Image (cartoon, helix red, strand yellow):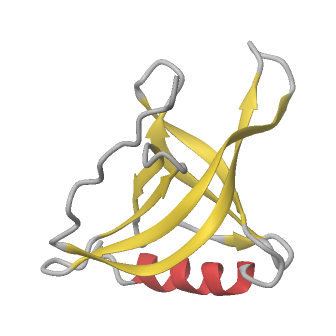
Amino acid sequence: EEPTVVQRADDGDEEAAHEARVAIKRHASDDGGAAEWKDAGKGTLRLMRHKANGKGRIVVRNDLGKPTLNCALSNKMKFVPQGDAGVLFQAVVAGPDGQPAVQKLLLRTRKGEGAALHKQLEALAQAQAS
């Protein structure tokens, strides 16, 4: 059976500040065991900025259009570059039980694109009101 492509809603009130292909890794532990990096999917990352109020968010959609990451940006968020192809940060996202939880995330891009992604994330996060 052919997978169904999710129709995206019109982003009429938002504009994309940056777009890149990424792989998402989550830092998670297995039932209280040692924490390790788990693959959380791949897709197209868009840094979205609301046209009216300037609020930003990170949205990653897989190839079918389903969101794999959707989190708001805050001026308190810290983004740490990981070589020339990644950015590490913590965000409030839906946990395994569906409840909001703080998770450590790693966005991996193509070599050489990590610095541009880090710069855009920092700029958009710092533009957020307290």
Give coordinates of residue 113: x percent, y percent: 72, 82
Give coordinates of residue 102: x percent, y percent: 53, 41
Q: Residue, x 76% and y 25% (percent of image)? A: 29
Reply above or below: 108 against 33: below
Quarter of the picture holding the C terminus: bottom left
Reply above or below: 51 against 26: below
Q: Residue, x 84% and y 18% (percent of image)? A: 33
Reply above or below: 27 against 46: above
Give coordinates of residue 72: x percent, y percent: 37, 58
Q: Is residue 41 visible?
A: yes
Residue 59 image-quadrant placement? bottom left
Nearer to us in this view, 29 or 65: 65
Q: Is residue 76 visible?
A: no
Residue 41 image-quadrant placement? top right
Q: What is the residue that sits farthest to the front in this orientation?
A: 1
Q: How many marks?
A: 0
Nearer to us in this view, 115 or 4: 4
Reply above or below: 30 against 119: above
Residue 52 image-quadrant placement? bottom left
Q: What is the residue that sits farthest to the top in this orientation?
A: 31
Side of 119 relative to 5 (left or right): right
Q: Residue, x 20% and y 62% (percent of image)? A: 10
Side of 113 relative to 78 (left or right): right
Side of 51 relative to 1 (left or right): left
Q: Residue, x 81% and y 70% (percent of image)? A: 82
